[in-house]
Amino acid sequence: MPHAVNTLDTTHSYGDWRDDLFKNGFVVVKNVIPKERCDYYIAKMFEWAERFPWGFDRNDKSTWTPEHLPTHMKGGMYHGYRVQHEKFIWEARTEPGVLETFSKLWGTDELLVSFDGMNFTLPTGKPLPPTEPWPHVDQSPLRKGMQCVQGILNFAPNGPKDGGLLVMKGSSKLMPEFFEAHPEVIGRQTWGSSDWFGFDEEEVKWFTDRGCELLKVCADPGDVILWDSRTMHHNCVPTSQNLRAIVYACYTPAAFAQPDILRQKAEFFDQRMGTTHWPHDNLFVHGKEPLRLGKEDNGKRDRPWEEPVETEQIQKLAGKLAY
């Protein structure tokens, strides 16, 4: 059984973007990161990809192809190579506006952050093959209330055709009712260490029949996209020829974490391991990395290219230092 935490009162009205998050299950918080910082993070992503031994060159678009890039999934989702602990990723996580946003949401400055990856989807000159939708939630029905809010730090223009997050608007409010009406689906998996749950077509229809709408979330550079982990969502690849550049970052109160989880989180930080979307629980690491183009990946790494500067702030966010 998941550890019980004191969650937010999502019925309270705040008169700002929090009301939209609680009502719809997602929100775009505008102008959180300065434009020049967005440009910096995009440049660092290009630099990161150029460090590998396969000849990627930001100035030569003929190299913007899988054989020249590190292994990724579903467009440009990167979770390998210890990218979660690159110096620039930690810099993005500690942007003042980002921390202020999550502090405002949770009502505390004492936060933990997820060791999550990034998405760097490059235009290839031809349409990417569509991916099969995988509508899901990232919070178990055994957990009550809002316990995790996921985040996208958005650095490049992201319009309707630029790939990205799709959400089932309003589904978070109906999620308890859905699981009560479908007790048999809970038995589809063991809920011990996993909060992920995927929906089939009939189950998706249950939500649309009740007025929920699948929306592509759009954002400008510097915006932060937030969504309740109980909101049905999935990703889509671009149909445009525009860059997608984001960092996934989720924050929850440090008070949500048990002492053993904090010890484990600190160990993973020291080992530079990536984990899940959850900052305070579910800290199992990603499984074996996929083969690169069907063969052994000669670019594997057990440390980031650039180590983060372990400031007091970063060590607290990583669970290494107590608040």
Image (cartoon, rainbow, N blue to C red):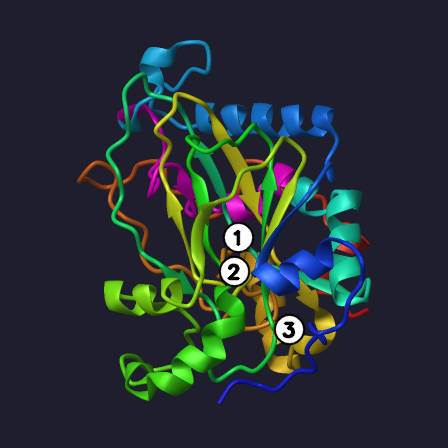
Any magenta on residue 69?
yes
Q: Label 1, on which residue?
A: 116
Q: Label 2, on which residue?
A: 277
Three-letter code for the amino acid on which mark 3 is drawn: Leu
**Which dot marks residue 262?**
3
Label 2 near label 1: C-beta < 8 Å? yes
Report which quarter residue 168 is drawn in.
bottom left
Residue count near mark 3 (Cα–Cα under 10 Å), binned few <14, some 14–19, many ≥20: many
Which residue is outermost to the left?
294
Q: Is residue 281 left or right of residue 97?
A: left
Q: Helix, strand, or loop for circle 2?
A: loop
Q: Which residue sits at x=17%, y=40%?
A: 294
Depth order, front residue of 114/197:
197
Q: Helix, strand, or loop for circle 1?
A: loop
Q: Is residue 138 left or right of residue 184?
A: right
105 shown above or below 222 = below
Depth order, front residue of 93/5:
5
How many callouts does the rendering have? 3
Could you tell me how far apart the alpha carbons at marks 1 and 2 are, in whole angstroms? 6 Å
The boundaries of the magenta stretch are 67-89
Q: Nearer the viewer, mark 3 or mark 1?
A: 1
Query: Quick one: label 1 or label 2, which is nearer the N terminus?
Result: 1
